[in-house]
Amino acid sequence: MKTFATPWFAGRTSAGVTLGELIVALAMLGLLLALTLPRYKAATDRAAVQSAVEDAEGVFGSARRSAITRRTLVAVAIDTASGSLTIRSAGTRLGFESLGSQFGVQLGSTRDSMSYDARGLGYGAADLSLYVRRGQAAETLFIARLGRVRH
């Protein structure tokens, strides 16, 4: 009886993937991305707005503290076009925060500035509302004449 040699490829399994398997995997990945991308964008917009509001809250608090320590009038000027807040006292710029370029947010406000007197109280006729928006996320910061800041 004759014995035949087994071929060299017998018993081996294929180590690669087929084109069909690759297309299915890429389609599933694309579907997963399409489902999660809007949620990711909304989450980053909310985080940017929240961070911008916290920074704005710090700017108003800093202006109030500066008015008390300097015993003079200190103002926060709001530039809605560039999205920036500038702290000024007697023509001197004490601080600057560009929320628009830093967080990509848009600002809106009921007044163009907020001033604090030497006691840290708001100087002027009314309270101030600062609106911060990016995409679908928005938040409002309220600054009272008494100096309180809340959102």
Image (spheres, rainbow, N blue to C red):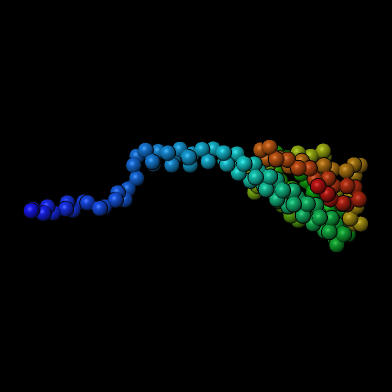
Residue situated furthest bottom in the rendering = 69
Position of 117 compared to 54: left or right?
right
Identify the residue at image location x=40%, y=38%. Answer: 23
Q: Looking at the picture, tell me which residue is in the foreground, 25 or 146.
A: 25
In the picture as drawn, the residue positioned furthest to the front comes out as: 1
As drawn, 39 above or below 13:
above
**Going 79% across and 39% down the picture, which residue do you hit?**
109
**For the point 54% across and 37% down, which residue is it?**
34
Q: In this view, does 32 lie to the left or right of 62?
A: left
* Residue 20 image position (x, y, % from top left): 37, 38
Q: How many labels does the image show?
A: 0
Quarter of the image for residue 137 reads top right
Q: Which residue appears farthest toward the left when viewing the image?
A: 1
Residue 72 image position (x, y, % from top left): 87, 56
Examine the rendering and report whether any part of residue 58 can be seen: yes
Measured from the top left, where is residue 127 in percent x and y? 88, 43
Residue 107 in sight: no
The spot of residue 136 in percent (x, y) is: 68, 37
73 versus 109 height, above or below: below
Q: Looking at this view, is 27 or 134 the one in front?
A: 27
| Residue at image coords 81%, 55% | 61
Horizontal arrangement in the rendering, residue 99 relative to residue 127 (left or right): left
